[in-house]
Amino acid sequence: MPAAVAGPEIERLIQLLARLPGLGPRSARRAALFLLKKREQIMGPLAGALQTALEKIQICSVCGNIDTRSPCTVCTDPRREPSIIVVVADIADLWALERAHAVNARYHVLGGTLSPLDGIGPDQLNIRSLISRIAEGGVAEVIIAVNATVEGQTTAHYLTDQLSGFAVKVTRLAHGVPVGGELDYLDEGTLAAALRSRTVF
Ligand SMILES: [Zn+2]
């Protein structure tokens, strides 16, 4: 291990920054140095924002989203269509769908996907709370928006099965050619899925 170039407080800051996604030890050192240089403009406000977020964050009791209030901002937004629930595996997926402005609905965050090998079964995910929401009524459609991976599709099948007893339309994302994509570059799985889910002009 190389000799420390800074006191333990700064070394600790670097170590913690290095745990952030996308930041290795090298970029963590750069970020730490940037913060130290910009104490007034960036480091102080960032420390304050982190502390405030830490004190206020809660998991939404309705949908599993993370916010500073529960029920969350999404669940309490009166402009959203309350009869459509988009089921996602992770909050990152909720944010991605919101960035795309693709749907003006409410969400349900599962907290992962079914993965028996990793010990993740239905009880480890927010599935029971989803069923309760559907059972309460008022939901016409459940859109299952999960990854096109084995775990994602296993989860989609399981949910479809669980929801089959309710008077609710269950839909899922289409799999196919990405916007701007060229057929020649697609893998066989994507191409086959696109052909299976073809639509009429
Ligand atoms: Zn919510």
Image: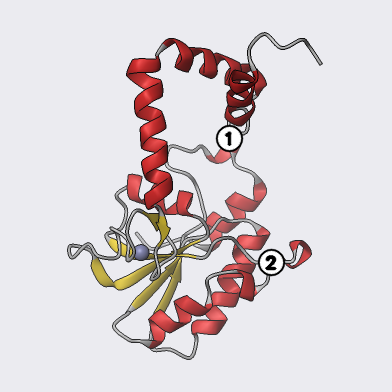
**Residue in the picture at 36% in, 70% down:** 85
Residue 35 versus residue 122 in the image, above or below: above
* Quadrant in the rendering for residue 13: top right
* Quadrant in the rendering for residue 6: top right
- Front residue of 2/140: it is 2
| Residue 175 percent location from the top left of the image | 52, 56
| Residue 53 percent location from the top left of the image | 39, 44
| Residue where numbered disc 1 is placed | 21
Which amino acid type corresponds to the residue marked 2 in the rendered image? Answer: Ile
Residue 66 versus residue 1 in the image, above or below: below
Which amino acid type corresponds to the residue marked 1 in the rendered image? Answer: Pro
Pick the quarter of the image with the N terminus.
top right
| Residue where numbered disc 2 is placed | 120
Mark identifier at residue 58: none
- Front residue of 123/151: it is 123
Judged from this view, the residue extending furthest toward the left is 79
Check disc 1: other Cα within 10 Å, few if <14, some if 14-19, many if 20+: few
- Front residue of 30/105: it is 30
Q: Is residue 9 left or right of residue 39?
A: right
| Residue 43 percent location from the top left of the image | 41, 22
Pick the quarter of the image with the C terminus.
bottom left
**Residue in the picture at 34% in, 16% down:** 40
* Quadrant in the rendering for residue 10: top right
Judged from this view, the residue extending furthest toward the right is 1
Marks 1 & 2, CB-CB < 8 Å contact: no
Helix, strand or loop under label 2: loop
Q: Earlier in the sequence, mark 1 or mark 2?
A: 1
Helix, strand or loop under label 1: loop
